[in-house]
Image (cartoon, coloured by chain):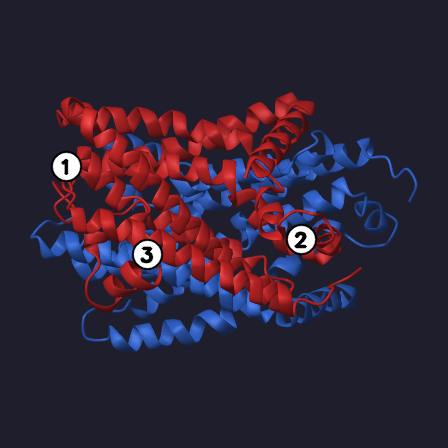
Amino acid sequence: MGKYSTTFKNSLSVFIQYRLNIGLILVSHVVSLSGLIFLWLSVYASGQQLQGYKLEQILVYYVFVALLTAGIGDGPGTGFDIVDDINQGEITNYLLKPYSYLRYRFLYLCGSICINMVFVLPLTCIGAYVMRHAFTFPSAMGWVIFIITVFIAILFEFLMYAIASLSSFWVTRGSHFIYATILITSLFDGSLIPLDLFPAWAYRLMSYLPFQFIIYTPIQAFLGKIHNPIPLLFIAILWLVVLFLILQLLWRKGVKKTEGVGR
Amino acid sequence: MSKYIRLYKIFLKVNFMKGMAYRGNFLFGCVLTLFESAISFITITVIYQHIQTIAGWSYYDALVLSGIAMITNSVGWLLYRGGLSDLDKIINRGDFDWMLIKPVDIQFLSTINRIDIEDTSRSIIGLYILGYGLHESHLFNHLWYTLPLFIVIFLFGQIVLYSVFLTFKTITFKSIQGWATNGIAYRFQQLARYPTDIYKGIVRVIYTYMLPLVFVATVPAKVLTGKFTWQLCVGSLVAAILSFVISRAIWKFAVKKYSSASS
């Protein structure tokens, strides 16, 4: 286990080294958030309202979209790193060592999430303090469900992008599969608009898909809209098992196919 | 000038040949950018199922705006987005030193170094929803006088956007690992999808005078929808000239201070 804790520490060092980038990424999320906040302020100021969302709820929704994306949304980065390792043959170095590459990548992602949180959490606390009178915070149970759903979101983030990146074993530009995952996820995870605003048939379909667990479900937990988490957790665990099995299968087939010529 | 046009044509041809070397990947890339634009269309449609207007912009006005934002994105990838996105990699690999010794303006060379032709497919949906929005608003009859003005204002918007991107990317000279600046540029461009009329107070001042987002898509859309004023058109011209001059000065200063990164 020691070797994996070293991976985690290395990941922390790398991300601290490039802290300017983390700062810049946070700025980019603030830029993005500013547009959405003003958009919805403008809509509600004109007397219109989204079904099921008060102004403060929709604002909190998009603030959390930004926080979750900035905090735990490093899945695409992990995916691109795996694509590079496979394309450039670096993967061979890992295969020769008594070391699980996928576990290494997961811990590397966890390291980046920890560093992101160092930047994101103070902003969250300031935001929570500012909005303390305008918004009802979750109950103790609500917090527990929220934290569990965030951990589940991290697992989905890793599994989806790792699966997409393993396409590099078979195609020249596996990065296209990462982009495809980013696009599909952005539509179905609730980061563009809350999923319950879609037509009822689409929302019903999306509630059986795994993408909702990355953004939509944690925010719904925070907003206190999840009253019975058991069916949701059941769907999440089922998808986690399916995705884990797909990842293992693709990894085994990919490694069998790979050739470490010149390494 | 003719030398630079000829060079651009050569780079376009080479990038097209590079794309065609892997036709499947090229087509997949086209499909992905098409899908990305389709997601924007779906998002706007779903939002407008719950509200009537956003800051005075109806659904069809929003389609015109969004269509222009998509075309802006396509043109950006054909002219400067790819090259500027790769600037940090070019500096890191030491290729920038190699480019400095070429008998061509280094800003021009860095800008057109990579041209993503597959991104033009974004304009297919962009043109469709632009045309649909104009048709449903009965604005086709006015195109004989709005279209020429629109083309001019659109080009001013491109100059503004290019200047902002270039200014962001000069951070790379300082931080070397400045890949996160791409995120800021991407999210800044994403903001162009929203009408800048939603902004109030200091943010409105910033997006009008400091980072003149208003001229990227909102003013061109206002020209096509007949909501423009001549002050806005003159403002576009002034913003284009000023932003280009300032970004050029910042670029020159950054290049002057640059010391080799790796070679």
Image location (x, y in percent) of residue B22? 67, 24
Q: Residues within 10 Å of mark 2 (few under 14, many from 20)?
A: some
Chain ID of residue with mark 2: B
> Label 3 amino acid?
Pro
Mark 2 falls on what kind of element?
A: helix
Mark 1 falls on what kind of element?
A: loop
Which quarter shows the N terminus of chain A? bottom right
- Residue at the spot of label 2: B89
Q: CA distance from mark 3 to mark 1?
A: 21 Å
Disc number for residue A100: none
Q: Residues within 10 Å of mark 1 (few under 14, many from 20)?
A: few
* Residue in front for this viewpoint, A135 or A112: A112
Spot the blue chain and give its letter.
A
- A7 with respect to B227 (left or right): right
Q: Residue at x 50, y 46 (%)?
A: A237
* Residue in front for this viewpoint, B240 or A35: B240
- Residue at the spot of label 1: B226
Q: CA distance from mark 1 to mark 2?
A: 43 Å
- B105 with respect to B63 (left or right): right
- Answer yes or no: do the residues labelled 3 and 1 have beta carbons within 8 Å? no
